Image: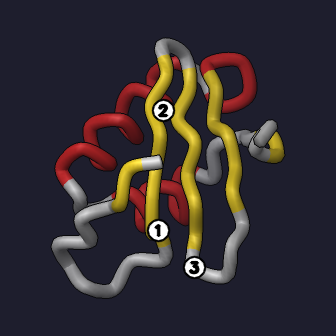
Amino acid sequence: MKPYKNVSGDSGVVAYAIGADFIDVAFKGGARYRYSNRSAGKDKVEAMKLLAAAGRGLSTFIARAQPGYEPDPD
């Protein structure tokens, strides 16, 4: 997983990994979830990928949009 930049300094996200049709997100406290095109929808997954790369807004997006997720398979 790649460390999340956390530009705001106040994110619950610590790391992420991007795949063709998913994004895995690791949170403070150790929880990890997979947001896939199947569980969250392609539009939300693509938005989350952009936010993750920018290092800002991912935790807020997840809290507000409440995308569907799966437990991280690893």
Mark 3 residue type? Lys
Along the horizontal axis of the image, is 14 left or right of 56? right
**Image spot of residue 14 (x, y percent):** 45, 69
Mark 1 residue type? Val
Residue pictured at 47% horizontal, 68% vertical: 13
Classify 33 as above or below 50.
Answer: below
Classify 52 as above or below 39.
Answer: below
Quadrant of the rendered image containing residue 60:
bottom left
Q: Are marks 2 and 3 in contact (CB under 8 Å)?
A: no
Spatial separation of the CA atoms under disc 2 and disc 3: 21 Å
**Image spot of residue 8 (x, y percent):** 20, 79
Residue pictured at 72% horizontal, 40% vertical: 68
Quadrant of the rendered image containing residue 7:
bottom left
Residue density around tag 1, few if under 14, some if 14–19, many if 20 or more, within 10 Å: many
Indicate which label's residue lies in the foreground, 2 or 1: 1
Spatial separation of the CA atoms under disc 3 and disc 1: 6 Å
Q: Are marks 2 and 1 in contact (CB under 8 Å)?
A: no
Residue density around tag 2, few if under 14, some if 14–19, many if 20 or more, within 10 Å: many
- The residue at which mark 1 appears reads as 13
Give the mark, 2 or 3, whose residue is nearer the N terminus.
3
Q: Are marks 3 and 1 in contact (CB under 8 Å)?
A: yes
Give the mark, 2 or 1, whose residue is nearer the N terminus.
1
Spatial separation of the CA atoms under disc 2 and disc 1: 16 Å
**Image spot of residue 1 (x, y percent):** 47, 48
Quadrant of the rendered image containing residue 69:
top right
Q: Nearer the viewer, residue 68 or 5?
A: 5
- The residue at which mark 2 appears reads as 44
Q: Which mark is residue 28?
A: 3
Residue farthest to the bottom?
10
